Image (cartoon, rainbow, N blue to C red):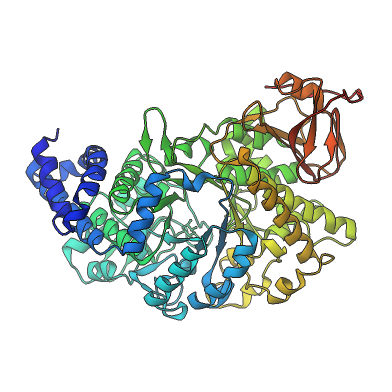
Amino acid sequence: MSSPAIFDRLLQSLVAQLPSDQHILITLRFQKQAPILLEKLRALYGHKFAEDAGFIEWMDQLLRVTGRMMARRPADLRKLDQQRSENKEWFSTQHMLGYCAYVDRFAGNLCGVADRIPHLKKLGVTYLHLLPFLKARQGENDGGFAVSDFDAIEPQLGSMADLQELAAQLRSAGISLCADFILNHVADDHPWALAAKSGHPGYRDYFYHYPDRTQPAIFEATLGQVFPQVAPGNFSFIDEMQQWVWTTFYPYQWDLNYTNPAVFADITAALLQLANRGVEVFRLDSTAFLWKREATNCMNQPEAHWILQALRCIVEIAAPGVLLKAEAIVPTAELPAYLGSQQPLVKECHLAYHSSLMAASWVALAEQNTDLIRQVMQATPELPEQASWLTYVRCHDDIGWNVLRPEASSGAQDVQQRLAHVARFFAGEEGSFARGASFQASDPAAVHGTVGMASALAGLSAAKTPLEQEYALRRMSLLYGLSMCFGGMPLIYMGDEFAQMNDDDYRQQAGHEYDSRWLHRPLWNADMAASAHHLNSNAGSMLHSLSHLLQQRRSLPQLAAHQPRRLLAGMPAEILAFIRGGQDDALVYIANFSAQTSALNLSAGLTQAGLQTTRISWCNQLDQTIYSDTLILPPWSQVWLTKVIQSTNQPQHPIPSGVIA
Ligand code: GLC
């Protein structure tokens, strides 16, 4: 229990360095967050101190540092904090749109990114995720995911002043800058790792280290592997330390030991420092791995959530305009916890990638069956307040099929066989239209992931006829349309707006050749961008189609993240249909995930959903066609229907009906 005197002491430490005109505001924020913050941190670290007084002393230090960071927070960012505190759902509207790119591949360096702002504005982007740009390890560094300094920029990409300038330019263009915050591990040349190597006992305990294989072997018995081919196992022997160090990813990425309170405190300070530089959204990398526990897969542990909840409290106090986004590539059942919950009210990250939805939507293309998407949707609870999904089609990583194991095993199917078929399909086998590749499978029968640009996976590279090209582009639009209608913030992956192809040259690039994710990390293709003015080019068609979908989405408040969503069940397997919004302003999304034309009895399905009366017709917002009863869906197509009140009844056509769940 914490007495009022303890809260008062902590508050005094927090505000000590803040001007007195901020005290009332900060006191209010603190009072709201302090009980949860204390509860979570005490649960994590209370037992690390011989007496509670020691823990309170540590908390006091943590809040003193937080206060120091707040004192340095620039006035424009404090103003943004205030505006967003008054409109806490600002990131949940149908106007939000994300874009994700590597700085160098998109625009050379940070200054170059500023030159791309007009392109982003044209698409309607409001959030730009730039993949890691902090100073990374020399040599191999997992595309920047091995950070050597949280407060320095990778020299080839620019300087800290460039970052601040870019963040400000983006902000004035209405775009929030999102940065990766790689808090699960640091590079083996980060000062903490160097100090550990040189024998500093304090810094050795920033990492999990073991003198021999006994303890690692116990953990390995239940651990998975992220890169089974090129970085098997989860521990690496470090010569300088003569110890085995926990390295979930590559051997040069050392997992941080969050049982050590100093790690939490230092990571918090690093995050607040970057927030003061103008980063508005933090993509919290690999959040599922933050806590280790014997006899588990060391993912999704309760303590990992407490760490994130404590971080959220600190952000709410120090920089409430900032968002936290969870990258947790985990089965659907484990995902919602990263957004907290409504009852009981738990606040964790503001955003989380919906990786199951993304993977299931690709499976639907391969199987011409929407079963997995429906299961994923049914297993996705309503969003808690101030939280939203990040919905996406592709990103810089592989599409991991294993997150779908629970859904894919339904109906007594052989899950291994089913997902292996999907992986083979996207690798271009079995007569498929796709031209991706399998990622890191340790044996041909094992399922891991798939790599490749969306256009290649959707069939554009293999298309030989105009119709095949058209179908490939439709498949991409189908998946992007779903990401826009599901309920969350959709994200465009750089190059997809022009249907950019795979980059096969990665095999010739030193340091990239062994990691096939580089297949889908191409350089911005200036020729394609230029040809996008011509509607008859693939780039032009894709850009046109995507821009059109986005434009419609912006005009449909039913598509805001918090609007209700319910599935229309009883549809044929290839059809996905769901309703967004309320009874009166319902938007009905219906998509055909197959190569056949599908005909549906619209009115029967919607009558059972309580949406249809005799005087209602439906207008497809994408092309303004009016439907009253029969809906004909060409191959790989979608409609976004809203109600139109008619004065007369429409003719009826007898078609098999859809039944409402
Ligand atoms: C995340 C990143 C991935 C990286 C890994 C290790 O999953 O998205 O690209 O390899 O973390 O940092």
Number of marks drawn = 0
Is residue 390 in view from this perspective? yes
Dividing the picture into quarters, in which one does residue 300 lie? top left
Q: Answer left or right for 512 relative to 594.
A: left
Drawn side of residue 226 relative to residue 261, left or right:
right
Placement of 262 over or under 660, stated as above or below: below
Front in this rendered view, residue 332 or 16 = 16
Q: Eyeballing the image, is 284 above or below 604?
A: below
Q: Position of residue 292 (x, y in %)?
A: 33, 46
Compared with 29, 433 (above or below) is below
Q: Position of residue 324 (x, y in %)?
A: 41, 51
170 to 339, vertically: above or below: below
Identify the image quadrant of the C terminus.
top right
Q: Name the one closer to the observer, 82 or 535.
A: 82
**Residue drawn at the location 16% of the way across and 49% of the way down:** 59
Give the residue at the far front of this rendering: 647
Query: Is 147 positioned to the left or the right of 201 in the image?
Result: right
Q: Quadrant of the N terminus?
A: top left
- Residue drawn at point x = 39 percent, y = 54 percent: 322
Position in image of residue 255 (x %, y %): 34, 57
The location of residue 348, given as percent across then percent down, is 38, 42
